[in-house]
Amino acid sequence: MTQLLRTPASRSEEASLLQAMKAIAPDGVRVGCRTIREGDETHLLPEEARSIPARHLEMRRASGAARWVARGLLAKLGSSDFAILRASSGAPVWPERITGSLAHDDEMAVAAAAPISRITSLGIDVEPAEPLPDDISALVTIDADVADTAIDRHLVGRLLFSAKEAVYKAVYPLDREVLGYEDIAIDLATGHATTKTGRRARLTYCLAPRVLVLAFVSI
């Protein structure tokens, strides 16, 4: 089993990603990230650990890293030591009057949180800055998606994938409807998304050092 150990390179990437996240975060949204490393599974609070059915060490390690970051953000918003449980839907449960989102890839965990007085609902996703495999890209992309010619064409598929993941996380708490990739249209040129339910979300993103998307809904 490969252990994800913290190295000078990972520390540098963590700092670079945090800087990029802060640059794209809307006012009032707090963001954080953490390189997933050995022992992060111990950051799960007992209540959190019981609510997460995954038994694979890698998944629990990633969940521990993401929740460790998120609890730090919540403390800054006035909710210290809050256990972020996993609901039956799979979504994290946040304190009242706060919206938030978690995500991770194989190496990096990220979180975002904001008072609902500023942002009604938000979603986040992170991916490696690599081309999306063609077979997955074919499942994700629909005719209604609009690319941005300024974006590296090799990363457009990955960005669309990440954007649809983030949008789903932002709109599910509002509509409680399961959506597929075909149900979410992304316009990268304008930074907007529309779902088949008519819900609209705004998008911000970065492409380096990782692909990361924030999706947020304001009512």
Image (spheres, helix red, strand yellow):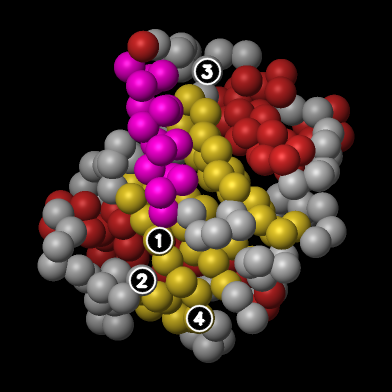
In the rendered image, is residue 77 in sight?
yes
Residue 191 tag number = 2
Q: In this rendering, is residue 115 above or below 133?
A: below
Task: Indicate which disc, 4 or 3, sits on the residue closer to the N terminus.
Answer: 3
Task: Indicate which disc, 4 or 2, sits on the residue closer to the N terminus.
Answer: 2
Q: Tell me whether circle 1 and circle 2 mark residues in contact (CB < 8 Å).
A: yes
Task: Indicate which disc, 1 or 3, sits on the residue closer to the N terminus.
Answer: 3
- Foreground disc of the pair 4, 3: 4
Where is residue 46 shown, x and y percent of the image?
Answer: 85, 28
Q: Is mark 4 on a helix, strand or loop?
A: strand
Task: Indicate which disc, 2 or 3, sits on the residue closer to the N terminus.
Answer: 3
Label 3 neighbour load within 10 Å: few <14, some 14-19, many 20+: many
In the rendered image, residue 22 lying in the magenta stretch gets the answer yes
The residue carrying mark 1 is 204
The residue carrying mark 4 is 200
Q: Relative to residue 211, is residue 73 drawn left or right? A: right
What's the CA distance linking mark 1 and mark 4? 14 Å
What's the CA distance linking mark 2 and mark 3? 33 Å
In the rendered image, is residue 63 in sight?
no
Q: In which quarter of the image is residue 186?
A: bottom left
Q: In this rendering, is residue 19 above or below 100?
A: above
Q: Give the range drawn in magenta.
A: 9-24
| Amino acid at the residue labelled 2 | Gly
Where is residue 50 shown, x and y percent of the image?
Answer: 83, 34
